[in-house]
Amino acid sequence: MIPIEAFLIFAAILFAIGAYGVLVKSNTIVVLMCIELMLNAANINFIVFSAFTTDVVGQVFVIMTITVAAAEVAVGIAILLNAYKTKGTIEADGLASMRW
Amino acid sequence: MFVEYTWLVPLIPLLCFVIVGFLGKKTPEGGGYIAITGAALSCVISALVAYEFFTSAAYHDPGFVTDQVVWFSLPGGYTLHFGYYIDSLACLMMLFASFISTLIFVYSKGYMHEQGVKKRRYYAEVSLFLTGMLGLAVSSNFMEMFVFWEIMGLCSYLLIGFWSFNHPEGDDAADNAASAAKKAFLVTRLGDVSLMAGLFVLLYTFGNLDYVGIFNPHALALADPNMIILASLLIFGGVIGKSAQFPLLDWLPDAMAGPTTVSALIHAATMVKAGVYLVARCYPLFTQDPAIMLFVALIGGITAFFAATMALNNMNIKRVLAYSTLSQLGYMFLALGAGGYLMALGFKNGDHHLVIAGAAGYTAGCLHMANHAFFKALLFLGSGSVIHAVGTEDMRLMGGLRKKMKITSAAMLLGSLSIAGFPFFSGFWSKELILETVMHAGDYGTEGYLFSILWVLGIVTAFMTAFYMFRMWYMTFGGKPRHASEHCHGESPASMTAPLLILSIFAVGFGFTILFGFDSLISIGADSTHNLVVGGGEAKGFEYFTDIFESIYTYVTVALVLIAISIAYVMYNKRAFDPAKFSGEGKSVLYTALTKRWWFPQLYNQIGWKLGYGVARGVDFVDRQIIDGTVNGLSAAVAGGGEILSKGQDGDVRSYTGVVIAGIVALFIVVLAIFWYMGGI
């Protein structure tokens, strides 16, 4: 049987990759994708703990998270579409007008 | 049936104030007739009330009639009332205040004739002034009294500054009516604050401010004696301000900036008499301790002496009269203080004779107050008549007016004889009684010797009074006509001379009332319940006559008065020797001290500037530097902090994310550290 640590380390690596992508990538589409990665890292943790404790609540949470993530991506892409229409770019560096 | 309508007495002048104030321009003489009618009606109602009171059973027992309604209640069970309290003293005050005011208003018709539209303001204000005095006289409690007391303070300010627009030159109170009004208001205000503090102490000690509640032996016996002394001294502080006693005496001479009729009103009928009234009213309270009354007498004696010295070389006819008012008020306080001192000692030692002797001082003080009201009103109105005729107040420019103004000069002569204490004129009786009481007080108690000193001051003051009054009379009416007199256009109109004639009769004759029962009406004594009430005493009648003329001291005083009059005659009528030789051509130290009014104005200014300005500077510093500084500092810190923090908001999503992640990591590390420190998860 694969030990629980392996799953957790895998989720942590996945989360770190996502965080790294959010921090360094300037293309906001990629940033959105990286956010998805981080969410899924959290989902894996939910699933793992659910399986190891035989408690289904974790799996219920994962379904809810996927739903929310889908809505989030829809809203996010709509915002980017409008940003592209008004600013002509979706680079994070170019979308810095809402500052003091 | 009339006593129930006592409230009409102050209400009628108040109505006149409203009517004249709003409709004065549309009525003849700027509402003068309305004001005169109102004052006369008040006088008639006062007389009816007084008559009914003196013939009623209440006069003998309990000695007063009172009725009051609830005005408002305060948390803590304090209830303040509004009502009337009629006793002999209130009747006396009502009668002479309304009577003299009526005459002054009639006189004003002639004196203020040329004032045009300003007459409306004048008559409205004097009516309100009269309301204040009459309301004060009939008040049933200290709070109500204080309201009317303040109304008078306001009116004095308005009336002293009546001619403020005619004297724009100079900033000093001596030559600017507006500054004089301000000075009068502020100086009396100092006393009023003290009076108010006294009322707070009374309310705290007795739980109410009603005369019936405080002036009864049970309440006084239960109260803390120290609180009584404190309240008495604070109340007397208010009296010092209002009646212009030492050291708050300097506003009254400057108050001469107002019209002469207003001076007459302030000095004779209202305002300064309120202080004397209050001391007489508070006798049951003040006699709880001889020290309070000793203080009253000392202040009175010192004021009488100092004010008289300042009158000796003044060249302004009205100012001489102003100083004489101060001096005579000092006599009244001296009498009340000496009488109260004897009475307080009598209560302390259980000596009934001392209580009766003290009552004589009370009678003397009140008689002098009434006498003074008549002769001072007469003198001021007479001086107004002179000023009206010659157009100046400087006596050096007058002289020889005797032939041109026969009625005025005769009236002024009678007034001067009365105030000087010439035998059988009204001032003589009260002054002799006062000096007798002071002499008597000198024989009792450990501080009695002070009264002997005050007695000496008293007869010296009597000498000076006779001198400066006749100096004034001879400079104005005697000798040869000088510059201004030559342009005099003769006697004043009948509306001005008629009040002079009426007042002359009272100035000469009112003193005789002491032989016909004045002492029984206005005396003070313990009734069957040991309650100190005014009135209902035994009339000594003609015994006073023998009393006065059997005493050697009477002859001393009379001799001094006659010598003073002769000196004034020789110096200022005959001009046998030049007064300037005495004063070293006006350069000697004493002469300068007197013209500089013993440096009282400078003292006031120094205190006003050094203390007032210093305090103001300190307060300004606290306000600007500490309070404003704290507020401004806080706002600057917030604004500056925001400025710095806003730099972090650079608009770059990735740096925000970085901060969030760094925060999470930092939090994680902190939690781990805490777990490690606590010893495991």
Image (tube, helix red, strand yellow):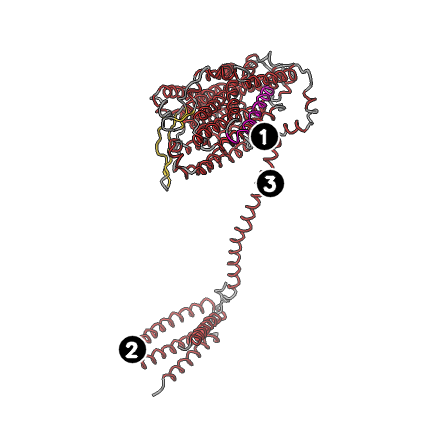
Residue B340, horizontal then vertical, whole percent? 47, 28
- The residue under the point 67% across, 29% down is B589
Pointer 1: what residue? B176
Q: Which mark is residue A56?
A: 2
Pointer 3: what residue? B610
Report the span colored magenta.
B445-469
Q: What element carries label 3?
A: helix
Q: Are marks 3 and 1 on the same chain?
A: yes
Image quarter in which the C terminus of chain B is found: bottom left
Q: In which quarter of the image is residue B38?
A: top left
Circle 2: residue type: Val
Residue B352, horizontal then vertical, whole percent? 43, 26
Circle 3: residue type: Lys
Q: Closer to the N terminus: mark 3 or mark 1?
A: 1
Residue A96, horizontal then vertical, whole percent? 49, 67
Is label 3 or label 2 in front?
A: 3
Nearer the observer, A46 or B423: B423
